[in-house]
Image (tube, helix red, strand yellow):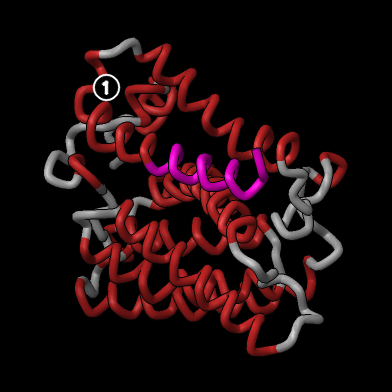
Amino acid sequence: MTMKRISFLELTGLTVLSWLFLWHWGPEITSYSTTLMAAGYLFILTYISYISPVLIHGDDHRYRGLSNWKTLFIRTDNFLPALYPFSIITLIGAILIIFASLLKNPSIFHQLNWNVFFLKLCFYILSSAVQGLFTLFILMRLIDLSTSDPFQINSDIPSEFKSRLLLTAMITCFFCLIHIPNFPVMGIILTSTPIVLWQYFKTPNFFLLICTHAILGTLLHRIYELPMRIGPFYSNPDRYLIRELFPIIGRIIGNSW
């Protein structure tokens, strides 16, 4: 079996499992063995982060924005060149969110519980890392299926532009669909994902990618107070998936949000 066919099957399998987890199993997760479901979730995470990219495909760790364990997997060789553009993206996004939040509720910072804010930030970093691994898995497998390399700086400009544009559009659409029916979040994904992903193609750094995601996501949730629930949980905000699979997370969060 060719690597392209394997990549196609992996993408198909991930899409089906994502749909099943979110829409079919998720709302009734307590009806199943939560231990078995949690183990399945962790296996999928292990597969997309290690088994597939490292053992099966041998993906270039630089394209995945990662280094080795000695640097806690943080890519340091391009850290400074990547820090400036990712910081600018984060700063501009933060300013826009804070400005919109003050228009919506001028007293938001007087009402804000900073302990809850930083707790949310910590969990958002973890969540962003998981979502980032899913994003990179999808990206690398789509590259396998394509005929060009969006990271290849020595390629001719039209080919590079076309490849980046197509991959950016596909990944943006995929994550928009995952966030149905939360249309405000879908709109944000449509505008922000192309910007962040385009920068990632230029300076692939996983650590900075998840930091940008976590900071802006926390500001949207805790400052602007945008509902972030998706799928069947959007209309049932009192029901949870991850908190049921991993009860310790639910105990730590409590009623904070």
* Apparent side of residue 80 relative to residue 207 in the rendered image (left or right): right
Q: Residue at x 55, y 33 (%)?
A: 45
Quarter-of-image position of residue 93: bottom left
On screen, residue 40 versus residue 220, left or right, reads right
Q: In which quadrant is the C terminus drawn?
A: top left
Q: Which residues are magenta?
A: 1-15
Q: Residue at x 38, y 45 (%)?
A: 116
Q: Amino acid at mark 1?
A: Ile
User: Height in image: 110 above or below 83?
Assistant: above
For the residue pair 154 and 70, the one nearer the viewer reads as: 154
* Residue 128 screen position, x and y as percent: 51, 50
Check residue 43 for magenta coloring. no
x and y percentages locating residue 162 in the rendered image: 57, 81
Task: Kindly tell me whether residue 44 is visible in this rendering.
Answer: yes
Q: Residues within 10 Å of mark 1 (few under 14, many from 20)?
A: some
* 251 to 86, vertically: above or below: above
Along the line of sight, which residue is nearer the eye, 14 or 113?
Answer: 14
- The image shows residue 25, relative to residue 83, as above or below, that is above
Residue 122 visible in rendering: no
Work out which quarter of the rendered image holds the N terminus and state it: top right
Question: Percent position (x, y) of residue 2?
Answer: 66, 44
Residue drawn 36% across the image and 38% down it:
16
User: Badge 1 is on which residue?
Assistant: 29
Q: Position of residue 151 (x, y in %)?
A: 71, 71
Question: Is residue 21 toward the left or the right of residue 68 in the image?
Answer: left
Q: Secondary structure at mark 1?
A: helix
Q: Is 6 contained in the magenta span?
A: yes
Q: Main secondary structure of the magenta part?
A: helix
